Image (cartoon, rainbow, N blue to C red):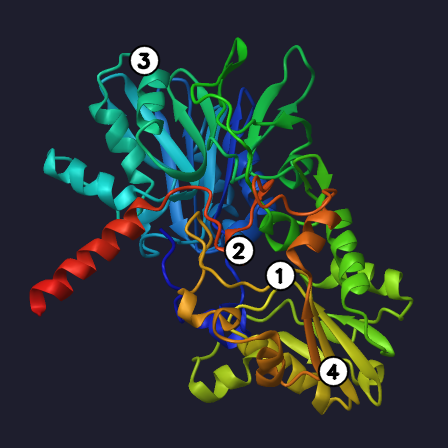
Amino acid sequence: MSAPARLGPDDLLGEDDKLHEECGVFGVWGVPDAAAVVALGLHALQHRGQEATGIVSLDGNRFHSHRGLGLVGDNFGEARVIEKLPGRVAIGHNRYATTGDTILRNVQPLYADFEFGGFAVAHNGNLTNAHILRRALVRRGCLFQSTTDSEVFVHLIAISLYSTVVDRLIDALKQVIGAYSLVALSNQALVGVRDPLGVRPLILGRIGNEATGGWVLASETCALDIVGAHFVRDIEPGEIVVIDDNGVESIKPFGRRPERFCVFEYIYFARPDSIVEGTPVYEARKRIGAELAEEAPVEADVIVPVPDSGVPAAMGYAAKSGIPFELGIIRNHYVGRTFIEPTDHIRHLGVKLKHSANRPMLEGKRVILVDDSIVRGTTSKKIVEMVRAAGAREVHMRISSPPTTHSCFYGIDTPERGQLLAARHTVEEMAALIGADSLAFISIDGLYRALGREGRDHMAPQFCDACFTGDYPISLPDLEDNSERQLSLLTASN
């Protein structure tokens, strides 16, 4: 399950006040220089994970692997690395840690040798019964090499009594609970899997012509463009696709269930140029901004986005309100992640390292700042202070998501609930804490309307919105088990 947010080098840049995406996955079958293509795909998915990356390729007989900490370009930017990953088949993974430390043994794709041959798996999301399964597997004698929940898949496949790789994988999937997308690779096939509720995204693409082209699996459509592939379709919730030289086979072993796609993909996580579940993300964010302008208008002279994630929503807000849009905050894209020791003093100045005020656009003006979310509130406070210091007469904050009041347990790294500003304070209190003249969030119904629904159906919500509502669509056995254990320890100590 999602670990509490950690204090690290990015804190000096204000990144600790953002929800961090889970991971990105990418795989290809029947493509020349497959590892190089996967590296390009992972580069396009870099926004989904920046802590580590890895690629496993298959040359027809042998598997080859390279995994490393850091960014895709740092690990696969040299030809000599790609040359050691031959073959026309490969899968890759970008990691942002939600379970397990950021150490090399946790970097994916994970690989194992089975009696049926090699098997590699890359996992995006989170298993909510991973700890319970892990304890049971350890009691059976399974030896875990990592601390990530993704390794549970490997051991469940290993002990399965089914004969084929796909049947073993189905057997494993029926034992896990959680939100996930997988790309996996065996000697016989490339496999893509999406969880039964479709919380995490996965799409199918095609490189080349219909007769001789290869196949692509990816977290987002933006990864298709960079490799010259075209979109075929979304993998359906609960669907397994098996890709080999004969084409694509679809298997649906879970039965039909109501879909609950992660609504935060539209708000922040997906890249703006991606198309998610048939909806262009850029247009969705502009509509969210327009809805926000309808719900929370305020007299002002200028609309200023908090870059980069607040830009489309701010454009939508400006278009709807008729207030001019200006880049009143400029982002520095070239700040190193660890170029300076993050002392308390430097951490306090951190936002200024990443963002600087465009004084001529702010001085003497009533400013509406538009951002995608408020988590702890630390970055918002510093942004407001910076805009005021540049001479703004008033500073109003508008947020293109509802208040984040609950932690995510489905693969997004969020703080514990007690550290979420909206879980502890009213909107008015939050406005005072960040120093804004006013603060408003889009309503949950407004968010749904912006995404083409009539509003939130509280009996059958169309999205996973647990971080806003506390309505968790997938059970949380590990959380309940941990609570019971803590209660037992407390009772025993008394």
Q: Give the percent coordinates (x, y) of residue 485.
A: 18, 55
Residue type beneath disc 4? Val
Which of labels 3 and 1 is toward the front?
1
Residue depicted at x 50% and y 63%: 405
Residue where numbered disc 1 is placed: 402
Label 2–label 3 contact, CB within 8 A? no
What crowding class fits label 2: few (fewer than 14 Cα within 10 Å), some (14-19), or many (20 or more)? some
Q: Secondary structure at mark 1?
A: loop
Residue nearest the viewer, comparing 420 with 165 = 420
Separation (CA) of disc 2 from disc 3: 41 Å
Upstream in the sequence, badge 4 or badge 1?
A: 4
The answer to whether one can see residue 11 in this image is: yes
Upstream in the sequence, badge 3 or badge 1?
A: 3
Image position of 31 (left or right of 251): right
Residue depicted at x 84% and y 80%: 361
- The quadrant holding residue 475 is top left
Q: Secondary structure at mark 3?
A: loop
Residue where numbered disc 2 is placed: 469
Q: Secondary structure at mark 2?
A: helix
The answer to whether residue 67 is above or below residue 359 is: above
Residue where numbered disc 4 is placed: 395
Separation (CA) of disc 4 from disc 1: 20 Å
Q: Give the label on residue 348, or none.
A: none
Residue type beneath disc 3? Thr
